[in-house]
Image: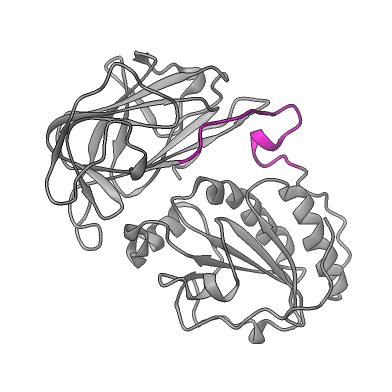
């Protein structure tokens, strides 16, 4: 990785609401500072994996002149809510300003195409590097340091994070092929109707790359809602880790969320401690996830690369499913439990 030449100036931010800021920051107002801009979404697993690095860079390099800005461009409709974004900012320990880019105005102005995208802007307002994804962040950190030095910042004698902030980035971690992200158009026994609930039964033949519904489900916006009675989602997959984007009950823009319980089993059995996601709990011998707000829930990690089948069972209606996402990387050491993402 190397800084790009000074060819293209960063566009000005369009008029958007900013959180975590007393006044709206501007790139013109940050002249003389290297600026790191991240385009992200609080349900995006790859985005969440960048946050330990951004927190570390803010702590270490803000005194040297670096300024970090977040642009929250939502993937799902509920993530347009300032209330949900503000709650996520607090829960995730984000201290830098965050723009609410609900209409993708900043996303378009910066020609962004994927979450997360990191953009480095120099002290004269030129875009010097763009990085897509959550890998190679220690190498990206070296570009931050080079830009600080180029801008006239102090000599930096602290070490680069060198992949130590996430277990899957450490030496010895193994990354293998994994199932691709699945959203509501990936129903293996679908589709679901938007006009009325559809009753689904689990077929005997199931394939990786699809999920399967049981019970009475209806398509609502960009999610699938269990409309009546009990239900379940069956997921054949291969991956090291699994997350699910879920919400529970009510109008996501205005109503407080009720807490709903989903029982999780892996290959027909309660999930074992060695692959326990940070959002799983053990209750009376069962493994469950408590869904209390719209977000990504961490269900499984450090699985072997064999084919598996996850079942999420719901005893009552009201839960909405949006997406499954997967990680291909098995960490070199056990992943510590952390605050929910």
Q: Main secondary structure of the magenta part?
A: loop
Q: Nearer the viewer, residue 3 or 194?
A: 194
In the rendered view, tell whether residue 184 sits above or below residue 70: above
Q: Is residue 79 left or right of residue 4?
A: left
Counting from the top left corner in percent of width and height, residue 30 is at 67, 81
Indicate how the structure is coloured in the image.
Answer: one colour
**For residue 178, what is the image quadrant?**
top right
**For residue 231, what is the image quadrant?**
top left
Q: Quadrant of the C terminus?
A: top left
Q: Quadrant of the N terminus?
A: bottom right
- Is 192 magenta? The answer is no
Q: Is residue 66 left or right of residue 222?
A: right
Q: Residue furthest toward the bottom?
A: 28
Which residue shows up at 86% across the image and 69% down it? 149
In the rendered view, tell whether residue 335 sits above or below residue 27: above
Which residue shows up at 25% across the image and 23% down it? 202
Q: Which span is picked out in magenta?
A: 163-181
Which residue shows up at 65% across the image and 61% down it? 118
Which residue shows up at 44% across the image and 26% down it? 208
- Is 179 magenta? The answer is yes
Q: Nearer the viewer, residue 79 or 277?
A: 79
Q: Is residue 276 left or right of residue 304?
A: left
Counting from the top left corner in percent of width and height, residue 295 is at 37, 48
Report the number of discs. Answer: 0
In the rendered view, tell whether residue 116 sits above or below residue 148: above
Counting from the top left corner in percent of width and height, residue 124 is at 77, 83
In the rendered view, tell whether residue 296 sits above or below residue 88: above
Counting from the top left corner in percent of width and height, residue 189 is at 27, 31
């Amino acid at each position: 990785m190397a800084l790009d030449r000074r060819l293209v100036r960063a566009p000005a931010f369009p008029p958007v609401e900013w959180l975590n800021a007393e006044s709206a920051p501007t790139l013109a107002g940050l002249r003389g500072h290297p600026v790191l801009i991240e385009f992200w979404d609080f349900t995006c697993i790859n985005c969440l994996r960048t946050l330990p690095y951004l927190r570390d860079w803010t702590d270490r390099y803000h005194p040297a002149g670096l300024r970090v800005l977040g642009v929250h461009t939502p993937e799902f409709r509920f993530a347009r809510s300032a209330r949900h974004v503000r709650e996520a900012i607090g829960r995730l320990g984000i201290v830098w300003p965050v723009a609410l880019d609900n209409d993708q105005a900043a996303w378009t102005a910066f020609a962004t195409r994927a979450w997360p995208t990191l953009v480095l802007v120099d002290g004269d307002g030129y875009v010097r590097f763009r990085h897509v994804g959550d890998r190679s962040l220690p190498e990206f950190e070296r570009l931050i340091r080079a830009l600080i030095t180029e801008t006239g910042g102090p000599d930096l004698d602290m070490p680069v994070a060198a992949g130590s902030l996430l277990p899957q980035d450490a030496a010895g971690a193994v990354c293998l092929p994994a199932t691709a992200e699945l959203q509501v158009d990936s129903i293996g026994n679908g589709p679901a109707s938007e006009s009325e609930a559809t009753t689904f039964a689990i077929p005997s033949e199931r394939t990786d790359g699809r999920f399967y519904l049981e019970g009475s489900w209806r398509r609502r916006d960009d999610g699938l809602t269990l409309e009546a009675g009990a239900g379940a989602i069956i997921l054949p997959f291969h991956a090291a880790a699994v997350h699910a984007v879920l919400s529970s009950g009510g109008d996501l823009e205005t109503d407080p969320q009720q807490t709903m319980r989903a029982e999780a089993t892996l290959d027909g059995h309660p999930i074992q401690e060695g692959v326990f996601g940070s959002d799983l709990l053990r209750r009376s011998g069962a493994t469950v996830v408590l869904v209390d707000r719209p977000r990504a829930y961490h269900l499984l990690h450090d699985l072997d690369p064999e084919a598996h089948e996850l079942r999420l069972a719901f005893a009552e209606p009201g839960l909405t499913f949006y997406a499954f996402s997967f990680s291909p990387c098995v960490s070199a050491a056990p992943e510590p439990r952390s605050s929910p993402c």
